[in-house]
Image (cartoon, helix red, strand yellow):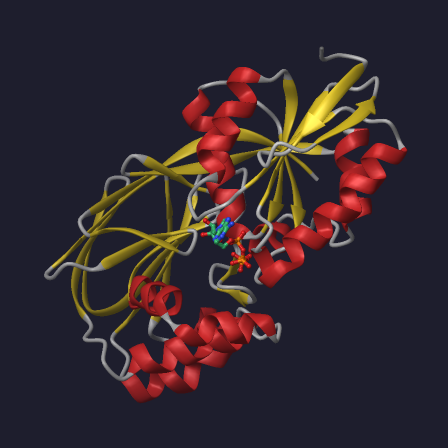
Amino acid sequence: MLGKIGAAWDNTGKTAQNAGSAGMLGFVVNPVAGNGRGLLVWKCLEKELVRRRISFRVKMTKKPGEAKNLVVLLLKKEEVSKIIAVGGDGTVSEVINGIEEAGKACPFGHIPAGSGNDFARGHSLASDPVVALEHILQDRGNKRIDLFHVNSQIAVNAVGAGFDGEVAKVTNEAGYKRWLNRLRLGMVAYFISVIRVLFTYRPCSVKLKVDDQEIKLDQVWLIAVANIPNYGGGMLICPNAIPDDGKAEVCVVCNVTRWSLLRAFPLIYKGAHVSHPGVQFFQGRRIVIEAEKELIVHADGEVIAATPVTIEVAPQRQVIYL
Ligand SMILES: Nc1ncnc2c1ncn2[C@@H]1O[C@H](COP(=O)(O)OP(=O)(O)OP(=O)(O)O)[C@@H](O)[C@H]1O
C-alpha cells in the first residue's frame, strides 16, 4: 500500500519500510555514474530518506540506456509525484526522455553524481547530495526549461554535429575514458579525444537553417546547439545560452586552420572563444543542419544520428527543481 506508509524497493528486489507525508518520490539511480559515485551518493540519500521517514521508490540502472524505461515504470505503475535522477548528464538525459515517453508531466529533480555534471552546473544545482535533496523536498525553487526535439528523442543540454559528434564517439568508445574517470580526470579523457580528432577531422560545407534564415558555411568544424552554457564537463561553448527563453543558442566554428583551432581550444573553458574570428553564434527555435558529407550528431554526449538533422525547441517543456 502506498501513501503515508509505503514500501520502497530497488529493481534488485530489496525492500525497505518508509513513511512520509509528502508525495511519493521516484528515484532513478545510475550506480556507475562518476565511476561509482552514483552508488555512494544513493547510499547517503537512502539513509537520509529513511531517517526522515519519507516515502520513495528507487530503481537502479543495470545497463546503459535503462533509465528511460525505469522512469516509464515509475510513472505508469507507481504513484510518484517527483522523478529524481541520481547520476550524470547521461542519466539526466535518459530520465527526461523517460518522462516524455511516459506522456505524463512530472517535475524533475537531479542529484549530481556524474563526472561532468553539466546540467547541474548549468542550473547551479547544489553539489552536496543532501542539500540538493532538501531543495527538491522543500520545492522552494523550480523553473520550466526548454527541451530540444531531435529526431525521435529529446536533448536536455545540447546537440552537436561534426567535430563534436566525432569527439563524443571517440570518447565513448575509448578505453582511456574508464580509467581516467576512475582518477576523476574525465576532462582529460575528453581533451585526449579532441586532440585525436583534431588531426584526422576534415571540415566541410554546411547549410544551416535557423528559423527562416539560411546560412551557407564553408570549412565547418562544428555546430553546437545548446540549451545551457556548460558543455563537455567544463567548457562554456554557448556562454549566452538561456534554458528557458524558448530559443536554442547555436555556435559554429568554421574557416580556421587545424593549428589555429588547437591554439584557440583552451579559450572555450572560459567562454573567451566568443570573439575569435572563426566563431559565429545564432539563435532560433528550429535549426536544420545539412552537410556535404554525413556528420555524426550527438545529443547530450551520446551519438544518436548523422546529418541531416533537425532540432526543434519545445519551449518551457519540463519543470525542474533548483
Ligand atoms: N549499470 C550500468 N552499467 C553500465 N553503464 C550504465 C549503467 N547504468 C547506466 N549506465 C550508462 O552510464 C552512462 C554514463 O552515465 P552518466 O552520464 O550518468 O555518468 P557520467 O558519464 O559519469 O557523468 P557525466 O555524463 O555527467 O560526465 C550512461 O550512458 C548510462 O546509460
Q: Nearer the viewer, residue 9 or 291?
A: 9
Q: Position of residue 18 (x, y in %)?
A: 81, 25
Q: Quadrant of the C terminus?
A: top right
Q: Residue at x 76, y 18 (%)?
A: 6
Q: Nearer the viewer, residue 254 or 155?
A: 155
Along the horizontal axis of the image, is 22 left or right of 293?
right
Q: Nearer the viewer, residue 125 or 217?
A: 125
Along the horizontal axis of the image, is 41 left or right of 65?
right
Q: Residue at x 83, y 17 (%)?
A: 21
Q: Residue furthest front?
A: 13
Which of the 4 image quadrants contains residue 4? top right
Q: Quadrant of the N terminus?
A: top right
**In the depicted structure, whether residue 21 falls above or below residue 41:** above
Q: Position of residue 201 (x, y in %)?
A: 23, 76
Q: Is residue 206 visible?
A: yes
Which of the 4 image quadrants contains residue 3? top right
Q: Position of residue 277 (x, y in %)?
A: 36, 75
Number of numbered discs present?
0
**In the depicted structure, whether residue 151 falls above or below residue 227:** above
Along the horizontal axis of the image, is 88 left or right of 247?
right
Q: Residue at x 59, y 71 (%)?
A: 182
Q: Residue at x 60, y 60 (%)?
A: 34
